[in-house]
Amino acid sequence: MENPLTPEVLADPVKLTRALVDIESVSLDEKHIADCVEEVLRGVPHLSTYRHGNTVMARTELGRAQRVVLAGHLDTVPINNNFPSELRGDLLYGCGTSDMKSGVALALNLAVTVADPRYDVTYFFYEAEEIEARYNGLTLVSHAHPQWLEADFAVLLEPTHGVVEAGCQGTMRVVVSTTGARAHSARSWRGSNAIHAAGEVLRRLEGYEARRVEIDGCAYREGLNAVKIGGGVAGNVIPDRCEIEVNYRFAPDRTPEQAQEHLREVFAGYEMRVTDSAPGAAPGLTAAPAQEFLAAVGAAPVGKLGWTDVARFAAMGIPALNFGPGDPNLAHHADEHVELDKIRAGDAILRRWLSGV
């Protein structure tokens, strides 16, 4: 199959965004897009290119004092009547336009066109960000080839609508259980209803006052919410168990251990088990490349309200920021789209930063 990433397309980040969107790449089906990206990068003389699974990495070896990473995931959520792309005026619609093929296009365009950056640059195009962590290309490479990720600073080209979003929140899911005693519903007084007992758990959630935390000038607002509830045995049985799944988004000044301890205080008296947890990431603003990047953007950063793979870089001791042209509020929507002006503006900022102009 002919590679749609032609020299003409590669030279224009807007055309490149559309071409990438028109390569279907739902999670676990990234082989074709990875093949196309790898073919392009192997033809660039100033880059050394490697591949692991459907993750492609290319890097300069210029002997610069510092190395930076530009990273973006190749996969999308499942298509929702929004493939292929459609151009409507100054808006490009289609699956992955915002999250995050417009960001991938910026990195791929720079990889091809910037031969003499002021830092050594690692370009990282990875698989399976939208699904379970065990498939994530960053996770897989961190185990198989950790040296690929070594750097002084990283920019994750997630959708931020052209704003620098620093760090990210941690996330934790727990299941809080209430118990009772079964009985025939015709003689309910002989039992104890576990679903009714869940009312106190829900009242605690409803009355919960979320922290607002400022770190390095970036504000993070926490959140604690029930996201699923289940219980019941049969239509004529008083239930003896009810489970409430709760999601906690916590500021990066808390570790997962501290977050868990806090939830045990909130749900004191109830059985609670942790089902999923990921740490947050500090803003990462102090590294010299980060300061130079902020100067190129020319606007103050804000805290990232959500979890992104910057946390994976932070866990490796690499400060990282989120920056991309897409609007995060449009991610995963059927009418997902990106503004062409945001793509062009993002390209100008990144090019200015890498060139030092």
Image: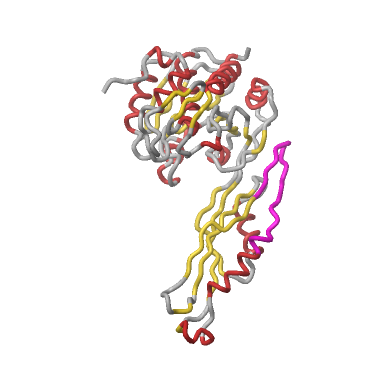
- In the displayed structure image, the side of residue 61 where residue 295 appears, left or right: right
Segment colored magenta: 204-222
| Residue 131, position as x, y percentages in the image | 43, 44
- In the displayed structure image, the side of residue 300 where residue 345 appears, left or right: left
Q: Nearer the viewer, residue 40 or 211?
A: 211
Look at the picture and state if 68 lies above or below 78. above
Residue extending farthest front: 89
Q: How is the image coloured?
A: secondary structure
Look at the picture and state if 313 lies above or below 340. below
| Residue 66, position as x, y percentages in the image | 58, 23
Q: Nearer the viewer, residue 332 or 299?
A: 332
In the rendered image, which quarter contains the N terminus? Answer: top left
> Picture quarter containing residue 54?
top left
Q: Residue at x 71, y 40 (%)?
A: 215
On whether residue 17 falls in the magenta region, the answer is no
> Picture quarter containing residue 3?
top left
Residue extending farthest left: 1
- In the displayed structure image, the side of residue 195 where residue 262 appears, left or right: right
| Residue 344, position as x, y percentages in the image | 54, 18
Q: Nearer the viewer, residue 105 or 15?
A: 15
One can see residue 329 in this view:
yes
How many discs appear? 0
Look at the picture and state if 201 lies above or below 276. below
One can see residue 142 in this view:
no
On whether residue 211 falls in the magenta region, the answer is yes
> Picture quarter containing residue 357?
top right
Q: Nearer the viewer, residue 25 or 52?
A: 25
